[in-house]
Image: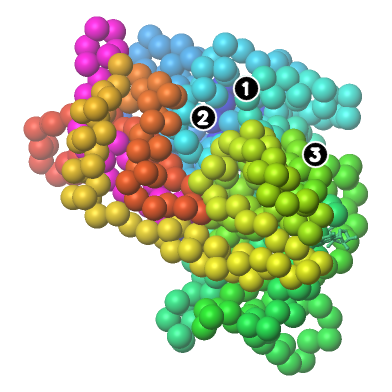
Amino acid sequence: MPPLVAIVGRPNVGKSTLFNRLIGQRTAIVEDQPGVTRDRRYAEGDWNGRVFRLVDTGGLAPGEGAGIAALVHQQARQAIDEADLVLFVIDAQDGLTPTDREVADMLRRSGRPLLAVANKVDRTEHESLANEMYRLGVEVVHGVSAAHGRGIGDLLDAMIALLPPPEAPATTAGEAPLRLAFVGKPNVGKSSLVNRLLGAERVLVHDQPGTTRDPIDTPFEYRGQQFVLVDTAGIRRRQKIDAPVERVAVILAERALARADICAVVIDAAAGPTEQDARLAGLVEAAGRAAVIVLNKSDLLRGQGDERQVRGALADQLPFMSWAASLTTSARTGQGVTGILDAALKARANHSRRVATGALNRLFEGIVERHPPPGVRGTANRLYYITQVEVRPPTFVVSASHPEGIPDSYHRYLIKEIREAFDFTGAPIRVRFHRRPRKRKARPGASSDE
Ligand code: GDP
Ligand code: GDP
């Protein structure tokens, strides 16, 4: 099944207009299941060859006596449970409401990939209105006009980038090739690294008979493993994109991300990591891709002192990437360059790793016993069980008596403990909380909970 994208937001922000815009000319399937969900519109769309399913939960009826806030909360909960990606839409001309803030918090805490969309940015003058959405603490706000089609292409690029990577077809040798993308600001040395890598002694670049132009992707082999260097032409040649420089780097990164399993995030070690590096790495993290951090231009560092300083700055600027290995390279001397491939192989293995449920729960019991979550309204918040539900990235679901009452700090504690117990270097991991399904008497003909 293609990945599912859910549109969430208050009534009248333009969800159904956006839905129609994102699926183009297709018709939606309206699902009407009385008592479960009402009026959910589904459709399949595609963009640059990636197929996705879109659901507009806008028609969900609020529970009896409940207002708009309850309605939007309900949409969001459903999206968190089902969707691979949530588009959270506000009306830029109306601005943020308290409900928008609450729902954004809830979506962020869920760990579900999230895109912030400010709609009704019909004209350039409206763009500053969209910026208000940054107050929700999101990385990137997409200002669009669903009614006029403005910003829709960029939004689709970003959506595709955040979807789970497509299943790569397995080769005859068995394992699928590892799809590696280089991501980074201009001038950090991406194209120099790629040229070094493809020219390295132990890297075997496969011939591409019949192609005279630069191939978009370059297949090669290293230590008997198949790799594909994604978007090689885009890395080697400067692309002409009509957008401000800092947007161009983001757009290129999103395109590369959409097609890769693993990103080498390249940073100029001599200049040190910057906010723009953090923004690009943030996209990789949000997309759930495996990553290796490459501190390039190490030949310009003077000794261990400088290197320590760069690593310190890295921990300060990109704290959310602490799970990725960081290596120093020099495209000029060749130092460390094939190390990127070794780190990528390790990251790939961790990204697709499944931990057995038994081992996981034995560990989990201890973690919770040592440090239980705070109570909610005077009752204990009980955590019952943990399962790994997905790989790429490894995703865990914890069943809890009060999933909404888990603080961010506890969420981080669980992630840290899981990381310490199992080596997930190079892979982001996600932990989500679900309410434990209540035991119900089985009704004839009804399917039971889980
Ligand atoms: P929903 O309730 O969130 O699904 O919102 P709708 O898609 O039904 O749109 C609500 C209203 O906003 C309608 O009158 C739309 O025509 C209008 N609308 C939707 N998108 C835009 C937009 O980009 N710009 C402007 N100015 N109006 C829009
Ligand atoms: P890109 O824009 O990220 O693809 O960066 P380039 O590969 O075009 O490199 C930008 C500049 O940095 C060029 O002048 C390169 O020669 C230089 N450069 C790239 N890698 C290194 C390195 O490892 N050491 C040094 N000293 N310079 C480098």
Above or below, 257 relative to 323 = below
Question: Which residue in the protein does label 1 denote?
Answer: 136
Pick the quarter of the image with the C terminus. Answer: top left
Crowding at mark 3 (Cα within 10 Å: few <14, some 14-19, many 20+): some
Which residue is nearer to you in this view: 302 or 261? 302
- Residue 415, can we see it? yes
**Is the Cβ of the residue at disc 1 closer than 8 Å to that at disc 3?**
no
**What's the magenta region?**
375-399
- The verdict on label 3 being within 8 Å of ligand 1 is yes
Q: Nearer the viewer, residue 141 or 274?
A: 274
Q: Is 384 covered by the magenta stretch?
A: yes
Name the residue type under label 3: Arg
Q: Residue at x 74, y 36 (%)?
A: 275
Residue 206 rendering spot, x and y as whole percentages: 67, 87
Give the SS element for disc 1.
helix
Q: Regarding mark 2 in the picture, which secondary structure is present there?
A: helix
**Mark with earlier residue (1, 3):** 1
Q: Position of residue 283 (x, y in %)?
A: 64, 44
- Residue that label 3 marks: 150
Mark 1 nearby-residue class (10 Å; few <14, some 14–19, many ≥20): some
| The image quadrant in which ligand 2 is located | bottom right
Residue 74 seen in the figure: no
Q: Is residue 239 left or right of residue 199?
A: right
Q: Is mark 1 within 8 Å of ligand 1?
A: no
Residue at the image point whose x is 10% and y is 41% from the top: 444
